[in-house]
Amino acid sequence: MKHKPRKPVVPRIAQETTRQAIIALLAEGPVSAKDISIAVHLPEKEVSSHLEHIRRSLHSTGAVLAVTPAECRACGFVFAKRERMTPPGKCPVCRSEAIDDPLFSILGMQEHEPD
Ligand SMILES: [Zn+2]
């Protein structure tokens, strides 16, 4: 059983800035939902929903949200079919719970000079 932190109240006004911060992290290199969660102070569940939005919004820019699938550290099983943004809890092959989180990054994003 994992201890779940209480969901903080996120002001609506912060949504866009949070998304920009997540996009900046993704553009720098592969990060897990956990990494993002720590960086932007949001629960991983919130991060996952931002990632879904970002994936859709990138579509029109020509950039893509690249996903490195989760992988079992014990036997090397790759969770390739898993389309969800949340990491799996357990390996279906060896039952190990030592699973490397899926990693996300943005590929093909245009560099923009800040105004
Ligand atoms: Zn395994």
Image: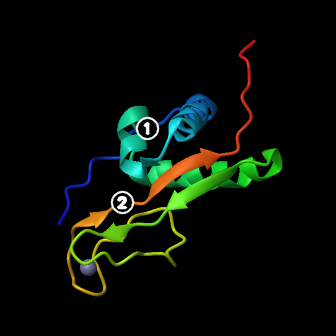
Q: Which residue is mark 2?
A: 101
In x, y percent, where is residue 111?
72, 29
How far across and how far down the image is residue 73, in percent? Answer: 25, 68
Q: Could you say which is closer to the camera, residue 61 or residue 41?
A: 61
Which amino acid, mark 1? Val
* Real-space Cα separation, disc 1 to disc 2, in angstroms: 26 Å
User: Which residue is at the far right?
Assistant: 60
Q: How is the image coloured?
A: rainbow
Q: Is mark 1 within 8 Å of ligand 1?
A: no
- Dot 2 surroundings within 10 Å: few (below 14), some, or many (20 or more)? many
In the rendered image, the quadrant that contains the N terminus is bottom left
Specify the quarter for ligand 1: bottom left
**Left or right of 5 in this view: 105:** right
Q: Identify the residue at horizontal 26%, vertical 54% (top origin).
A: 4
Residue beneath the point at 40% across and 66% down: 70
The numbered mark at residue 91 is: none
Which quadrant of the rendered structure holds the C terminus? top right
Tell me the kind of residue under disc 2: Asp
Around disc 1, counting alpha carbons within 10 Å, would you say few (fewer than 14), some (14 to 19), or many (20 or more)? few
Q: Position of residue 91 (x, y in %)?
A: 29, 79
Sequence-earlier tag: 1 or 2? 1
Q: In the image, what residue occupies the spot 30% across and 47% down?
A: 6
Residue visible at 36% across and 71% down?
A: 88
Circle 1 is placed at which residue position? 9
Looking at the rendered image, the disc whose residue lies closer to the viewer, 1 or 2, is: 2
